[in-house]
Image (cartoon, rainbow, N blue to C red):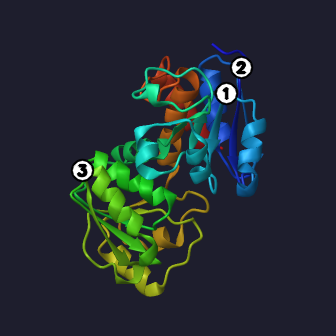
Amino acid sequence: MNSGARLEVWGDPIGHSRSPLLHHAAYRALGLDWGFTRREVPAARFAERLAESRVRGIAVTYPLKEHAFRAAAWRGRRAQLTGVANTLFFGEPGDLPRLEEREGDGPLAFNTDVGGIALALREIGADAARSVRIIGAGATATSALVALSELDVDVVEIAARRPERAAHLIALGDRAGVAAHVVAVDDASAPVDLTIATLPGGTALSEHALESLSRRGGLLFDVAYSPWPTPLASAWGGAAHHGLPMLLHQAVLQVRIFVNGDPSAPVDDESAVVEAMRAALTTS
């Protein structure tokens, strides 16, 4: 195993990221002396910083996920579907499909947000929902839509502040095998089993939208976790869950990649590693 490996999380801003907390807990539990640090990288400097980088892997957050996707020499299926990547890996790959299609010596790209959302929904008991509303149309909404396709959801409604900018999600639904349609967020009123909010935590919605979304939105899973509760969660009439389970589970998949080169290959004594990560997250 690569002794003293260096890992980073990139974003702009990045000071709020809890990724170092999660990853340090994982590598301590695995007995690895690996470092994991934050690095503020503006989008305009991404290619330059990537060319200078000498790390084993990078966790990528806003606003760099599309840049990470484009920089890769190979992309996992979830990254291919969504067009975004939150993980870049420079080490020795595991038993990955289509690896012979790798183009050059660049990094491998993965989207672990998809698996993180699916696993979080299972954890909160929401994976049996058949009708779902996604609020938002950005990168996290694309990951949520693919996660729902993997959970065999029947119908997905995209409630967007700018519906004209959400057409790509209809096409994504077609590729992923789930029926999706778009409405304006103020017009979302159909009853659903589950609502997944993918907006930044401080996003303000109209009083009409808050009331309508809450009244017929079923269970709320809000990917935001700080500050909590969000305005939407505060207005919600039923059960509302924050996004820390997603943060945890997507990081577990990243640990698998950074250690084994494959998000489907569990690390040694993974249940103990996950509990160490969860404890670090909940006690911070």
Give the residue at x 59% y 19%.
30
**Which residue corresponds to mark 2?**
33
Q: Secondary structure at mark 1?
A: loop
Left or right side of 43 for 193: left
Q: Nearer the viewer, residue 207 or 62?
A: 62
- Label 1 environment density (alpha carbons within 10 Å; few <14, some 14–19, many ≥20): some
Q: Earlier in the sequence, mark 3 or mark 1?
A: 1
**Label ID, residue 56:** 1
Residues at marks 2 and 1 touching, judged by CB atoms closer than 8 Å:
no
Location of the N terminus by quadrant is: top right
The residue tagged 3 is 128
Q: Is residue 252 above or below residue 214?
A: above
Amino acid under disc 2: Asp
Secondary structure found at label 2: loop
* Depth check, front residue: 178 or 224: 178
First in sequence: mark 3 vs mark 2: 2
How far across and how far down the image is residue 191, in percent? 24, 72
**161 versus 34 height, above or below:** below
Query: In the image, which is nearer the foreground, mark 3 or mark 1?
Result: 1
Specify few, some or many for label 2: CA neighbours under 10 Å numbering under 14, 14-19, or 20 or more.
Answer: few
Tell me the amino acid under the disc marked 3.
Ala
Q: Residue at x 62, y 45 (%)?
A: 60
Q: Which image quadrant for residue 38?
A: top right
